[in-house]
Image (cartoon, helix red, strand yellow):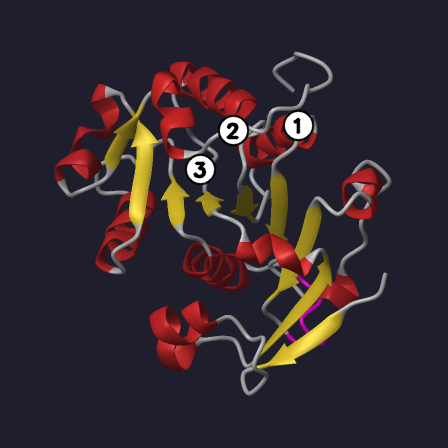
Amino acid sequence: MDHIQLLQTDPAYPARLHALLGPDAPPQLGLAGNRALLQERTLSLFCSIRCPGAMILQTYQLMRTLRRCRLAVISGFHSPMERECLRTLANGTAGIVWCLAKSLAAFRLSGEWQPLFESGRLLLVAPFPPHVTRITKATALFRNRVAAALADDAFLPYAAAGGRTEKFCQELLAWDKTVFTLAAPENAGIVERGAHALSLSDVTSFWPTHEVPVTGDTLL
């Protein structure tokens, strides 16, 4: 899989990483796939492992609408819920930016996602040098910050009060990102702090849809 390494001094290096991460911006960025996806309207996606059942269903429903929209979704697609969101988005027209928690040299794209790559709907991003070959808690947390910094907006379906996701949401709001969450009582805390409660009927008002048919109509 052909890829390039962008150094911070490269004119193509995303300015947002410098602006938002400052000295923590990755010294180099590995890219493979359609780099033009970073020029689309972008939405980062973060789903925790623990999430109320009703919110899981709402998230799937939102992904089924988002997969038809003119945007690119950026995520690590690592948690089980994020991986199911990836499968839903893949059955659509939206772009997908997969941000890795290890180097591109240590990543193997499975056959399941090869059609996305070949069709130009997938970009792989790795904010780590070649020697980082294992995913750790530290690399996953850094990956999430990079994914959030690259995107225009963020979607966090659920943030438990006092939890790590709520703290992450506060950081994104401090960056002046528009943070979306599900319209649910459980998210009242982050909505009070500035997150936008998103309902299914709101989606296309923020992200217009592609006027092309989408094959299949399953949740996955």
Q: Do the residues labelled 1 and 2 touch (CB within 8 Å)?
A: yes
Instruction: Point out the tag, 1 or 2, that comes first from the N-terminus.
Output: 2
Can residue 99 be seen here? The reply is: no
Residue under the point 58% across and 68% down:
127
Q: Where is residue 110 in the image (x, y as percent from the top left)?
A: 83, 44
Q: Residues within 10 Å of mark 2 (few under 14, many from 20)?
A: many
Q: How far apart are marks 1 and 3 (CA)?
A: 23 Å
> Percent x, y for residue 99?
59, 55
Badge 3 density bin: few <14, some 14–19, many ≥20, Cα 10 Å: some
Placement of 188 over or under 190, stated as above or below:
above
Q: Residue at x 22, y 58 (%)?
A: 174
In the image, 114 versus 105, the foreground residue is 114
Query: In the depicted view, which residue is nearer to us: 45 or 94?
Result: 94
Name the mark on residue 6: none
Q: In this view, does 186 lie to the left or right of 137?
A: left
Q: Which of marks 1 and 3 is nearer the N terminus?
A: 3
User: How far is mark 1 from mark 2, CA to CA?
Assistant: 8 Å
Q: Is the magenta stretch mostly helix, strand or loop?
A: loop
Q: Which residue is the extreme one toward the left?
A: 192
- The earlier-in-sequence mark between 2 and 3 is 3
Q: Disc 1 designates what residue?
A: 92
**Label for residue 48?**
3
